[in-house]
């Protein structure tokens, strides 16, 4: 099975999910350092849709000004525009497999798509 993780090595949760993925036998893993190579707007929309989330549910609030900017209550277009301008606003880790996509917070959510 193929899997992609949008990863930030500075994040403990992201590192835990990556460790779990690396333990999965026969997993063809693609690790994307999303701060350097952010997903496209379309890809991000698709990931949130597949995860059953609104884009505002995928906003990183810790260490950002997302709340002050109203992004936790904003519409999808406003949130996605902000994420495209500042990838640090994308909460991580996002993981996608053939079974779906998850924002793996808590890390155990990755089990649902393995």
Image: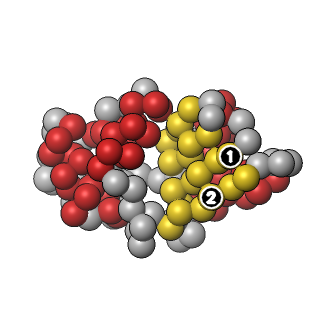
Q: In this image, 102 relative to 18: left or right?
A: left
Label 2: state its secondary structure: strand
Q: Give the alpha-carbon distance from disc 2 to disc 1, as whole Å.
A: 8 Å
Q: Position of residue 5 (x, y in %)?
A: 57, 54
- Tell me if residue 44 can be seen: yes
- Say which mark, if any, is on residue 2: 1
Task: Determine the image quadrant of residue 9.
Answer: bottom right
Q: Is residue 5 above or below residue 36?
A: above
Q: Position of residue 33 (x, y in %)?
A: 50, 67
Label 1: state its secondary structure: strand
User: Going 28% across and 40% down the picture, which residue do you hit?
Assistant: 56
User: Going 63% across and 30% down the picture, which residue do you hit?
Assistant: 99
Residue furthest to the top in view is 52
Which image quarter holds the C terminus? top right
Q: Nearer the viewer, residue 41 or 11?
A: 41
Q: In this image, 51 relative to 38: left or right?
A: right
- Discs 2, 1 touching: Cβ within 8 Å: yes
Q: In this image, 104 relative to 74: left or right?
A: right
User: Going 56% across and 46% down the picture, which residue do you hit?
Assistant: 95
Question: In this figure, which residue is indicated by the disc labeled 2?
Answer: 30
Q: In this image, 111 relative to 33: left or right?
A: right
Q: How is the image coloured?
A: secondary structure
């Amino acid at each position: 099975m193929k899997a992609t993780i949008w990863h930030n090595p500075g994040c403990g949760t992201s590192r835990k999910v990556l460790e779990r993925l690396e333990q999965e036998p026969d997993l063809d893993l693609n690790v994307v350092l999303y701060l350097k190579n952010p997903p496209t707007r379309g890809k991000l929309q698709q990931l949130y849709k597949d995860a059953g989330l609104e884009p505002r549910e995928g906003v990183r609030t810790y260490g950002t000004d997302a709340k002050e900017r109203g992004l936790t209550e904003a519409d999808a277009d406003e949130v996605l525009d902000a994420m495209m301008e500042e990838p640090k606003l994308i909460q991580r880790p996002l993981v996608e497999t053939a079974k779906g996509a998850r924002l793996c917070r808590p890390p155990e959510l990755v089990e649902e798509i393995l």
